[in-house]
Image (spheres, rainbow, N blue to C red):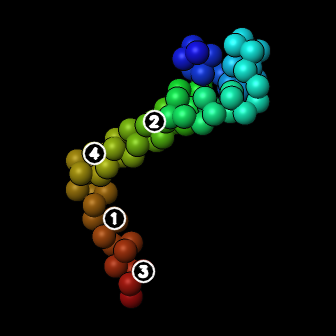
């Protein structure tokens, strides 16, 4: 069951596969998918991975900012001009 959920592209895909594999009706398969197990689907994992990669890029940019006095000065100048 977990394998089906992990390898399904979406919750509707997982529900259909569960129905086919275990002979569940639509309500039963939807109930299984609606459990916390839905976070095991590929699409959910891909969303988490995408968010993780964005956060890593942001962290790298912020580290670069902290390491560059020139970048800090440029940002401060830009923000000061926006306030004025």
Who comes first in sequence, dot 4 or dot 1?
4
The single residue placed furthest to the bottom in the displayed view is: 84
Front disc: 1 or 3: 3
> Dot 2, crowdedness within 10 Å: few (<14), some or many (≥20)?
few
Which secondary structure lies at badge 3? helix
Which secondary structure lies at badge 4? helix
Q: Is residue 62 left or right of residue 25?
A: left
Residue of label 3: 82
Q: Which mark is residue 74?
A: 1
Report if the CB atoms under discs 3 and 2 are less than 8 Å apart.
no
Who comes first in sequence, dot 3 or dot 2?
2
| C-alpha span from label 2 to label 1 | 26 Å
Residue found 72% across the figure and 11% down from its top: 21
Who comes first in sequence, dot 4 or dot 2?
2
Residue found 33% across the figure and 64% down from its top: 74
Of 46 and 68, nearer the camera is 46
Q: Which of the 4 image quarters holds residue 60? A: top left
* Looking at the image, residue 3 lies above or below residue 8: above
Of 78 and 30, nearer the camera is 30
Which secondary structure lies at badge 1? helix
| C-alpha span from label 4 to label 3 | 24 Å
Q: Residue 36: x and y, percent?
A: 50, 34
Report if the CB atoms under discs 1 and 3 are less than 8 Å apart.
no
Q: Residue 20: x and y, percent?
A: 77, 15
> Dot 3, crowdedness within 10 Å: few (<14), some or many (≥20)?
few
Which secondary structure lies at badge 2? helix
Residue of label 4: 63
Front disc: 2 or 1: 2
């Amino acid at each position: 069951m977990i394998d089906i959920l992990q390898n399904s592209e979406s919750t509707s895909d997982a529900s259909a596969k569960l129905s086919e594999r275990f002979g569940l009706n639509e309500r039963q398969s939807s109930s299984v998918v609606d459990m916390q197990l839905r976070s095991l689907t590929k699409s959910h994992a891909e969303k988490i991975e995408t968010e993780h990669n964005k956060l890593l890029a942001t962290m790298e940019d912020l580290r670069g900012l902290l390491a560059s006095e020139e970048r800090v000065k440029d940002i401060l100048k830009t923000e000061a001009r926006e306030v004025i």
